[in-house]
Each structure stands twice: as structure tokens, then as C-alpha cells.
Amino acid sequence: MAEAADLLGLSIRQVRRLRRAYQRRGLKALVHGNRGRRSARRLADALCERVITLAKTIYRHMPVGKAKLMVHSAARTESLKT
């Protein structure tokens, strides 16, 4: 158990949990439960398109760091409006 934990970079307790889950549910137990689902924190598609448009048009001549801040600020303002 300890060797497996060291190899995986996990605690012995976590390796025991994984082994128990594998014995009960097979390989499905080792796949993250949210796999295939959209993130709860994902931005709306329209907002993503708006951010890309802003980055390619209004903020295209700014240094990357500054443009990133401006696009983030604009996107946040847009998301607060909806």
C-alpha cells in the first residue's frame, strides 16, 4: 500500500479508497465523476465570443498583459449586465 501511495503521490488512505472503489465499481471508479459534463464555472458561449471579439478588435494593439486585463474587465461588466 505504501509503495503504491508513493508511486502515485497519494496518501495510503486515498490509495485504500481507490482500491475499494475499484473493487466495487471497476474502472469507472477511477474516472472523475464530472467527466463529460460542462463546468459549473464555464462562461456562456455568447460571452466567450464577445471576449474574443474585444481581444481581436479594440484591444489588439495593446500589450498582452494590458489587453488581458481590459478584456477581463469588459467581460465582467458584460456578465453583470445579464
Image: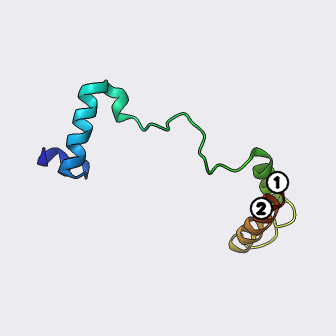
Q: Mark 1: few, some, or many residues within 10 Å (few <14, many ≥20)?
A: some
Residue sitting farthest toward the right = 58
Q: Residue 43: x, y in percent?
A: 70, 50
Give the quadrant of residue 69.
Answer: bottom right
- The reply to whether callout 1 and callout 2 are in contact (CB within 8 Å) is yes
In this rendering, would 47 be left or right of 57?
left
Q: CA distance from mark 1 to mark 2?
A: 8 Å
Query: Label 1 sits on what residue type?
Result: Arg
Of residues 59 and 82, the one nearer the viewer is 82
Q: Secondary structure at mark 1?
A: helix
Q: Residue 63: x, y in percent?
A: 73, 73
Q: Which residue is mark 2?
A: 75
Q: Secondary structure at mark 2?
A: helix
Of residues 8 and 39, the one nearer the viewer is 39
Please determine whether, in this image, residue 77 is positioned above or below residue 24: below
Query: Label 2 sits on what residue type?
Result: Ala
Which quadrant: the N terminus? top left
In this rendering, would 33 be left or right of 69?
left
Q: Which residue is mark 1?
A: 50
Residue sitting farthest toward the left = 2
In this rendering, would 56 be left or right of 3?
right
Give the quadrant of residue 74.
Answer: bottom right
Please determine whether, in this image, residue 6 is positioned above or below residue 33: below
Please determine whether, in this image, residue 63 is positioned above or below residue 81: below
Of residues 63 and 46, the one nearer the viewer is 46
Disc assigned to residue 21 = none
Q: Residue 31: x, y in percent?
A: 39, 34
Please name the residue shown 60% across and 47% down the image: 40
Q: Mark 2: few, some, or many residues within 10 Å (few <14, many ≥20)?
A: some
